[in-house]
Amino acid sequence: MPIMMSVHELQPGMRLYRSLYHGDMVLLPAGKVIEQEQIDALRRRHAEAQLCVCDPILDELVEFQDQTRDQEIALRVHRRLTEVLSGVREKFQARAALRGSDLASLQDSLAEVIRYIQENPVTAALLLSSSDWHGHLQEHSANVFYLSLLMGNAIRQYVRQERERQSAADRLQSCFALNLAPLATGAIFHDIGMLPIESVYGKEDPLTSEERERIRNHPLAGEAMLPKETDAVTRMVIRTHHENWQGTGYPQGVPATRLHIFSRIIRIADAYDAATSPRVYKRAKTPARALWEMVRGPYACLYDPIVLKVFAGLIQPFPIGARILLSCGQYGVVVAHNREEPFRPRIIIAFGADGRRLPPEAMVGPIDLARSNHIRMVRFGTEDLSYLNRPTVRAEDDMAGPEELFSYVYP
């Protein structure tokens, strides 16, 4: 099964366990035996890439969680949304208004994707990324859509309860209470108000006061760009997707009692994807760091705690096959995700302190870190994981200044 490796660790003759993608384009297919020429090309063009290679020795010793299907589902959704969003983007770039017929066609396409996600549940949310930051808003919208729909499907009873509470109805019809179409449409359009000022994503200088004001008002601008046929829930979701659980946020500081459940869902998906987008935000965080700050750090108060708990179970901060330095001085390989405690996966100790593979008889595990108090994770790649062992994270130390775009999208 897989071992994650950087392109600099690859050697000729290794076999890819999982396809390597650039966006939704396959660079190298699963099962491919890598040659030196391909390794050289990857080091030149994709120096930061991480690949999963087959490891027949570990495969005989432990059963790894297989996420091939999760990746296939994510890829299919990503490709379909790319097609859908391309037409929307072209219309806005041509300064053409979105018409009611355009919205109806879009919602028909989204309904197909919603059904597909409902019929194909996943064990973990796997996001695809592209190094082409010029398409960031399109990709970001696709990721926020996917995360939001996964959460919406996972908490359907909570969605129904909250919609009944906010409608002041004793009991809403299921077809209305469980209708996720406004969530889907809101997720797709949540950042359209940023399209007129998309240039700020590539800006090196601090934001001007005008740019800061336009960013703070982009939820209102996005709502105004929708056709008049757009339903009231979708409008509300787009208008309030940057509002916080405890009543802060922007542009209006809506309190939790009035914040729609779909807004709370998109708020979490939007913050996480923005925080972990390496191509745009120079202060991008690793999935582990962003998730930890959102779930365990002082940022947790910004999000609906019920939705946040479900979200944490869907996110995999340490990929299957990741090699992690442990407090014992050796390296563990992640073999399974822990949905209840995502920061404590199941591992097998398979590499010594020098990074070399241990002989099979010296390997230990699999070990459930959620049940082991004497082994801690110390480092993943170049990231110091000591924050995982602190009761809270002093996230304020890492916050962007008020002049930076990052401070408006995360936390």
Image (cartoon, rainbow, N blue to C red):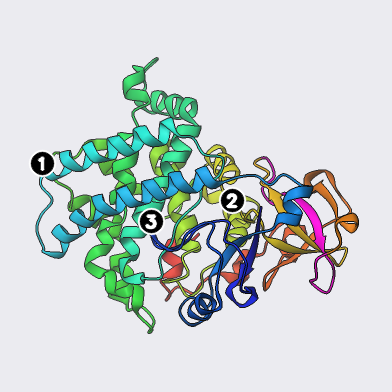
Residue in front for this viewpoint, 173 or 90: 90
Would residue 214 be counted in the magenta stretch?
no
Q: Kindly identify which residue carries mark 1.
A: 101
* Residue in the picture at 10% in, 41% down: 101
Please state the extent of the stretch shown in magenta in the rendering: 340-357
Indicate the amino acid at tag 3.
Tyr
Q: Where is residue 353 in the image (x, y as percent from the top left)?
A: 85, 71
**Number of other residues with Cα within 10 Å of mark 2, as a class: few under 14, some 14 to 19, many 20 or more:** some
Q: What element carries label 1?
A: helix
Q: Where is residue 23 in the image (x, y as percent from the top left)?
A: 39, 62
Indicate the amino acid at tag 2.
Ala
Residue in front for this viewpoint, 19 or 186: 19
Q: Kindly identify which residue carries mark 3.
A: 250
Seen in the picture, residue 366 relative to 50 is either above or below; the reply is above
Q: Kindly identify which residue carries mark 2.
A: 300
**Number of other residues with Cα within 10 Å of mark 3, as a class: few under 14, some 14 to 19, many 20 or more:** many
Task: Tell me if I can see residue 98 in this picture.
Answer: yes
Q: Which of marks 3 and 1 is nearer the N terminus?
A: 1
Q: Where is residue 394 in the image (x, y as percent from the top left)?
A: 66, 64
* Residue in the picture at 32% in, 74% down: 200
